[in-house]
Amino acid sequence: MLDCSISILTKNEERNIGACLDAIFTQKGIGEFEVNLVDSGSTDATLQIARGYPIRIEQIPAHEFHHARTRNLAASLGKGPIVVNLSGDAIPASDRWLHSMLANFSDPGVGAAYGRQLPKPGSTLERYDTFDQVYGAQRLVKDPAHRNGLGYRFYHFSDVNSAIRRSVWEENPYPEDLKMFEDLAIAKRILDAGWKIIYEPGATVFHSHEYSTKQLFKRYFDIGYTLKELQIWDTPGTRSALFRDFGTLVGKQFARARNGAKRHKERAGLGQSFAKSAGFVLGLNQRFLPLALKRRLSSYGAFE
């Protein structure tokens, strides 16, 4: 009997997919599982590498990729009672990653769980600072009955490294009307339906993308727009928690910029923090912007 089905999405991940699958197939303390990989038009050696492992591979054209729809497709390929989501460039950090993730579902009230992300070696300070804020060492139980002062982090969730009870996914699939941040949207659906979500730091992966200042501005424009669209921005504690965390981050960056040996990097980090904030505020207030400008500001084509 299967314990879970692992869903992986890839496109041109030849540098990562081998390490990802190696880590999966050396997991300990678990029963049987299956791996379903959906590739959206890789032109490198991703598929050649993946075919060396006992997994199911489905291919779709690049133009058919859609964050929510493709996640739903990957989940539908499996039979296990838990759907584990993993990005093709996320590398489990230990051989207990999967056990730590699945252990949370011993509580029948848990609908989903997600794990810690650590930046890959050589990542920018912006990635280290961001991950340090949202992926801490403390396990969190997000219970709709007790918001616990988490603010905006109450709805935080990432399909880079997560798991969802299959029955919960069947009742609350990824909303395909959204082009982006489908993980945030499904987390809201799950929590609003009364299920708990666990943040499990024991289920850690190495994962990070390098973003330019311009890319961060556009990405956070989309985040601001999505929080408003999903009506998360107006939930209790969201604004105060976000402003508090931003102040803490900028204060830390200012201190490092004054005292650190690599001041140019610290100043670049400060610039990126303010770019993210500017993009976020514009995203929250996108209704006041002309459509042509919104299309230019969105990283994910939200207004196409």
Image (cartoon, helix red, strand yellow):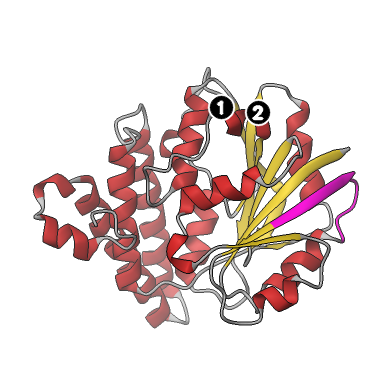
Residue shown at 83%/48% (left/top)?
Answer: 33
Whether residue 141 is visible, yes or no, is: no
Q: What is the number of callouts on the image?
A: 2
Question: For this rendering, which residue is in front, 65 or 202?
Answer: 65
Give the residue number, with chain letter if any, for mark 1.
171
Amino acid type, mark 1: Glu
Give the residue number, with chain letter if any, for mark 2.
167
Q: Quadrant of the N terminus?
A: top right
Q: Dividing the picture into quarters, in which one does residue 91 lie?
A: bottom right
Amino acid type, mark 2: Ser
- 199 lies above or below 19: above
The part of the chain drawn in magenta is: 26-36
Dot 1: within a 10 Å radius of its alpha carbon, few (fewer than 14), some, or many (20 or more) residues?
Answer: few
Whether residue 180 is visible, yes or no, is: yes
In screen coordinates, is 246 left or right of 51? left
Numbered disc 1: secondary structure: helix
Q: Dividing the picture into quarters, in which one does residue 290 lie?
A: bottom left
Q: Quadrant of the C terminus?
A: bottom left
Q: Residue 85, position in %: x, y?
A: 64, 50
Residue shown at 78%/49% (left/top)?
Answer: 98
Q: Is residue 143 magenta?
A: no
Residue shown at 14%/61% (left/top)?
Answer: 293
Mark 1 and mark 2: span between their CA atoms? 6 Å
Q: Is residue 27 magenta?
A: yes
In screen coordinates, is 229 left or right of 261? left
- 123 lies above or below 2: below
Question: Label 2 near label 1: C-beta < 8 Å?
Answer: yes
Numbered disc 2: secondary structure: helix
Q: Residue 284, position in %: x, y?
A: 23, 46
In screen coordinates, is 76 left or right of 157? right
Outermost residue, top side: 145
Residue shown at 81%/73% (left/top)?
Answer: 52
